[in-house]
Image: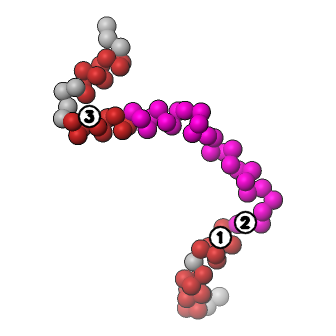
Amino acid sequence: MSTIAERIYEIVRELPESKAAEILDFAEFVKARESPESGDFFALAGLWAGRDIDEESLRKKAWPELRARFCATRIF
């Protein structure tokens, strides 16, 4: 019985070099995603603690000219 790594090797060695490179890229991506250095997404949540930031304020800062043009054409 072969291991998973051996099965992958058997399949990949029959592929053209460009397709084998895609498999390698994917394997490296999976490995990087699982490494402790990749960090915890929610560990950054504290970065925004105590700041007065909401969706509306972000939109105002991100697209000020679009907001002005949009508000000028709408009746509230």
Left or right of 50? Residue 16 is left
Q: Tell me if mark 3 has few (under 14), some (14-19) or many (20+) residues whose alpha carbon lies within 10 angstroms of its own.
A: some
Reading the image, the residue beneath label 2 is 53
| Magenta stretch encompasses residue 44 | yes
| Magenta stretch encompasses residue 49 | yes
**Residues marked 3 and 2 touching at CB (< 8 Å):** no
x 81%, y 59%: residue: 50
Residue 69 against residue 36 in the figure, above or below = below
Give the Cα separation between the discs numbered 2 and 1.
Answer: 7 Å
Place of residue 65 in the rendered image (x, y in percent of width and height, measured from the top left): 56, 85
Reading the image, the residue beneath label 1 is 58
Q: Which quadrant holds residue 53?
A: bottom right
Q: Which mark is residue 20?
A: 3
| Amino acid type of the residue that numbered disc 1 sits on in the rendered structure | Leu
x 68%, y 49%: residue: 44
**Residues marked 2 and 1 touching at CB (< 8 Å):** yes
Q: Disc 3 or disc 1, which is closer to the eye?
A: 3
x 78%, y 63%: residue: 51
| Magenta stretch in the rendered image | 27-54
Name the quarter where the C terminus is drawn: bottom right
